[in-house]
Amino acid sequence: MIVALKPNVSPEKQERLVEWFKEMGLGVHVSTGTYQTVLGLIGDTTKVDMDLVGSLDIVEKVSRVTETFKCCNRKFHPDDTVIDVNGVKIGGGNFCIIAGPCSVESEEQIVGIAKAVKEAGAGMLRGGAFKPRTSPYDFQGLRAVGLELLKTARRETGLPIVTEIMSATDLPLFEDVDVLQVGARNMQNFDLLRELGRTDKPILLKRGLANTLKELLMSAEYIMASGNEKVILCERGIRTFSDYLRNTLDLSAVPMLHELSHLPVVVDPSHATGIAKLVPPMALAGTACGCDGLLIEVHNDPVHALSDGAQSIKPDEFAVLAKKIKAVREASL
Ligand code: PEP
Ligand code: MN
């Protein structure tokens, strides 16, 4: 249930109302917006008398939420969430490009790419250290060593680092990572989501290969209901019957997720298409439909990349793309 308060309600009156709901055994999520404060009631609200609550002089409107996702629901939290990663913001009008290789391969590789993408305008550096590969015989990532190399690249460039975590047991290794990525294959690893909800790190949550938007939001809900509200959603393409592409980029997910949720939405054109030359047009399309950021795979030597070389663009192509992204953003504002 959502209780929207009238403007300028005194803190004492608001607190009295919150306490009253808590006495009924309900959880109360308070969202203080620029113009309005909204209380989200969590729990069994069937016994709450909506008419009585609606008649209180400090209450503007009461409505029931039919959706099962609450914490990430825009009705609970009308203002966009802005996530601040060491001063780099994403959401609520703040746009950020996260760029870097699929996998961290060596110090020279990750530091070189980090410098190049920073120079071109990226706000964060990505790079996989723990890699979820379809085949157990493929490169699995440099693991703990990869995380150390990412930190070296951060020291050299100042870019916050984004990297995938596959298991909650690895969490101690990720203590000094800025953004934890949950990959498509782990979107419904509920134990992992719950554990990440107990951390205070921003989580980049990728949509599963065959998951609906509601399932994506329910996964965000797992993290948020465990106490961590810093979730960034990522549309990275879904499996369809499109035969020439790795996946199908569901761009309509961007405005739909923005309508349903207050969380930032990032588009990943690299995993969505699997083809380097399709990355720029789809990155621009994602930008045009209002995403809050992009996740782009960049490699200095894609032909010899240890993973996802076919979809990786080169640093000079990234620099050209970053300029076009800026132009599209300016044109669509
Ligand atoms: C990745 O970002 O490198 C990755 C493995 O992505 P996804 O989980 O979307 O396949
Ligand atoms: Mn990849």
Image (cartoon, grey):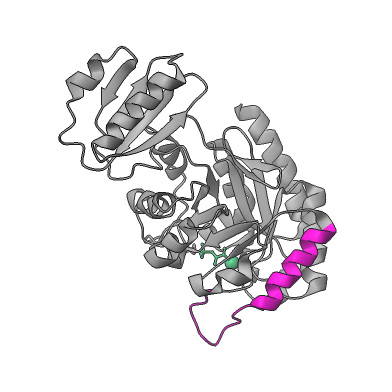
205 is higher (above) or lower (below) than 7: below
Front residue of 183/302: it is 183
Q: Residue at x 59, y 74 (%)?
A: 130
Q: Which span of residues is magenta-colored?
A: 132-156
Rendering coords of residue 89 (x, y %): 65, 41
| Among the 4 quarters of the image, the one containing residue 276 | bottom right
Q: Is residue 135 magenta?
A: yes
The residue at the far bottom in this view is: 137
Rendering coords of residue 94 (x, y %): 63, 36
Q: Is residue 1 visible?
A: no
Front residue of 286/193: it is 193
Rendering coords of residue 27 (x, y %): 32, 41
211 is higher (above) or lower (below) than 326: below
7 with respect to 181 (left or right): left
Q: Residue at x 72, y 76 (%)?
A: 304
Q: Residue at x 77, y 50 (%)?
A: 319
Q: Is residue 147 magenta?
A: yes
In which quadrant of this rendering is ligand 1 seen? bottom right
Front residue of 308/224: it is 224
129 is higher (above) or lower (below) than 252: below
Q: Is residue 150 visible?
A: yes
